[in-house]
Amino acid sequence: MNPAPSKPASSSKVAILDAAEELFAERGYRDTTVADIARVAGMSPANLYRHFENKEDIAAGCCYRRLEKKNQALREVLEKKRLNATERLEEFTLALLRYTYEDTQKRQKMNQVIEVVIASRPEVFYYVVSSTQSMIAEILAQGNAQKEFAVENVVTTAETVLAALAIFFNPLFMHLYPLPEFERRARATAHLLVQGLACR
């Protein structure tokens, strides 16, 4: 299931999401009102409600948009031709971490948005899981094809790999360590995963 919006956003919708991201990042979710968002977007609240049902709906739209940008960055790792599957899994893990870490540092108050959306819109969480898991499955399939990995069920194994990487892509954990320590842990985790996936 892919609940992400498939149609291109209208210019008014983009303006609303731009304004909301700016305000959420500056004030946080709780201290931002729909009227504030409408004002910064240059429209009336009535016009805003033509595109979104409420503030929670706007927050979900912001999350989807951030996730699409992250997916684009991760997809670049999958498109690097020079990497074997072992290298790709490590680079993917580091890219996942670095994007999440840097995005969280720039927009610390956006964590409020993430908390609200995860609690009230589980489909956003499922979208994160399904899109990231499908990319991991591609790496595992490459490893099988190149005789680096011996994975019997690529989909099930991708679920397990994703669970092992959870700390590296959850914005709520990004305050736990400085980036170099996170990177050390990410490399160690990727190395351990590869040992388990490797052909015997």
Image: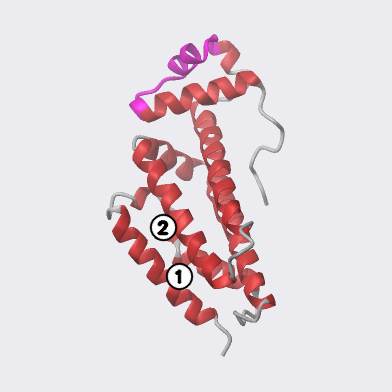
Q: Residue furthest front?
A: 82
Question: Magenta residues?
Answer: 26-45
Residues at marks 2 and 1, CA–CA distance in whole angstroms: 11 Å
Q: Is residue 39 magenta?
A: yes
Q: Which residue occupies 50% across, 81% down?
A: 196
User: What's the residue type where badge 2 is placed?
Assistant: Phe
Taking depth in this image into account, of 23 and 89 the one nearest to the observer is 89
Q: Is residue 133 above or below residue 27?
A: below
Where is mark 1, residue-wise? 190
Q: Quadrant of residue 150?
A: bottom right
Q: Nearer the viewer, residue 87 or 26?
A: 87
Q: Going by the image, does 141 lie left or right of 158?
A: right
Q: Please identify the quadrant where the C terminus is shown.
A: bottom right
Judged from the image, the secondary structure of the residue bearing numbered disc 1 is helix
Classify residue 63 as left or right of residue 189. right
Compared with residue 145, is residue 94 higher up or lower down, i.e. above or below? above
Within 10 Å of the Cα at label 1, are there few (<14), some (14-19), or many (20+) other Cα atoms?
Answer: many
Image coordinates of residue 90 in percent, x first then y, are: 48, 66
Q: Nearer the viewer, mark 2 or mark 1?
A: 1
Residue 12 percent coordinates (x, y): 62, 18
The reply to whether residue 147 is visible in this rendering is yes
